[in-house]
Image: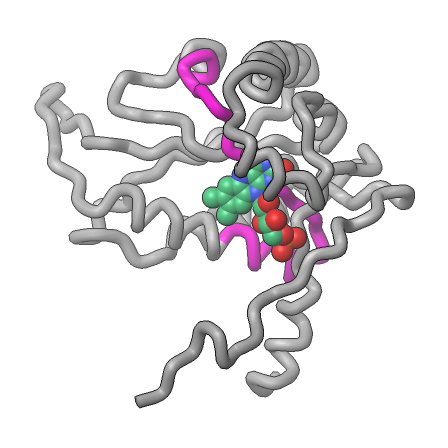
């Protein structure tokens, strides 16, 4: 495949907020997360944990807690400017995709590592490394024909508790994965023209 073909293929990647609920291959999920794990990272510390949440009851609780937080945010705290920017995406405080998608991947940043004897291990460029890894994941899922959403909950302490994660890990993204629902209408948005973000000097 040449780069023009690759560009056309990857142009089709979009964020999906409604899923069919049909089952998908667990092997695909594991392989795509393994690809995310190949991403470059500061000093090769690989400061990430990927938790795959399959359990339906747990996902129901995650949805309930996330919606409580989002409801408060959307009703009481969201700045007007942000609300206006979200309008074309038609997002609101309801997050059914957390339950409906057959898989939910929670991505946690390891702010530091913990050695065999409990000692703290410094991690570098945690945020940058995590974001690159997520990019690998999203495109791998797309190339496997799977839809996903990079959902960033407003607050995440509840997730650490529900998933029983150690204190060096901070949940950052929740990524529902599955097949898109037939009746989901993608938001009509555009991408920048290449001249607006590529500069050749
Ligand atoms: C860091 C980051 C955070 C995001 N957070 C959310 C979110 O909380 N909820 C949501 O519905 N979409 C979220 N998105 C998805 C964006 O809204 C989406 O990528 C953008 O509108 C472009 O649409 P596209 O992915 O279909 O090209 C997020 C994307 C990124 C990269």
- The region drawn magenta spans 137-160
Compared with 117, 131 (above or below) is below
Look at the image and tell me whether residue 104 can be seen.
yes
Q: Position of residue 143 (x, y in %)?
A: 64, 62
For residue 179, side relative to residue 49 (left or right): right
Colour scheme of this structure image? Answer: one colour
Q: Position of residue 88 (x, y in %)?
A: 71, 45
For residue 178, side relative to residue 127 (left or right): right
- Name the residue at 14% across, 28% down: 115
Q: Position of residue 72 (x, y in %)?
A: 57, 12
Asked whether 174 or 137 is in front, the reply is 174
- Name the residue at 27% across, 17% down: 167
Look at the image and tell me whether residue 175 can be seen.
no
Quarter occupied by residue 60: top right
- Name the residue at 52% across, 78% down: 194
Q: Position of residue 188 (x, y in %)?
A: 75, 55
For residue 18, side relative to residue 15 (left or right): right
């Amino acid at each position: 495949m040449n780069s023009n073909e690759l560009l056309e293929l990857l142009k089709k990647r979009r964020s999906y907020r409604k899923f069919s609920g049909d089952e998908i291959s667990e092997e695909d999920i594991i392989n795509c997360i393994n690809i995310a794990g190949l991403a470059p990272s500061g000093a090769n510390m690989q400061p990430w944990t990927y938790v795959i949440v399959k359990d339906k009851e747990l996902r129901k609780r995650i949805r309930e807690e996330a919606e409580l937080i989002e409801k408060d945010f959307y009703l009481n705290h969201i700045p007007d400017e942000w609300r206006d920017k979200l309008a074309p995406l038609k997002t609101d405080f309801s997050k059914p995709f957390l339950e409906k998608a057959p898989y939910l991947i929670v991505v946690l940043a390891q702010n530091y590592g913990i050695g065999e004897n409990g000692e703290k291990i410094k991690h570098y460029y945690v945020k940058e490394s995590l974001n690159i890894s997520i990019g690998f994941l999203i495109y791998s899922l797309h190339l496997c024909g799977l839809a996903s959403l990079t959902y960033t909950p407003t607050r995440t302490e509840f997730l650490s508790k529900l998933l029983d994660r150690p204190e060096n890990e901070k949940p950052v993204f929740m990524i529902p994965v599955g097949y898109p629902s037939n009746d989901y209408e993608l938001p009509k948005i555009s991408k920048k023209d290449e001249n607006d973000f590529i500069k050749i000097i």
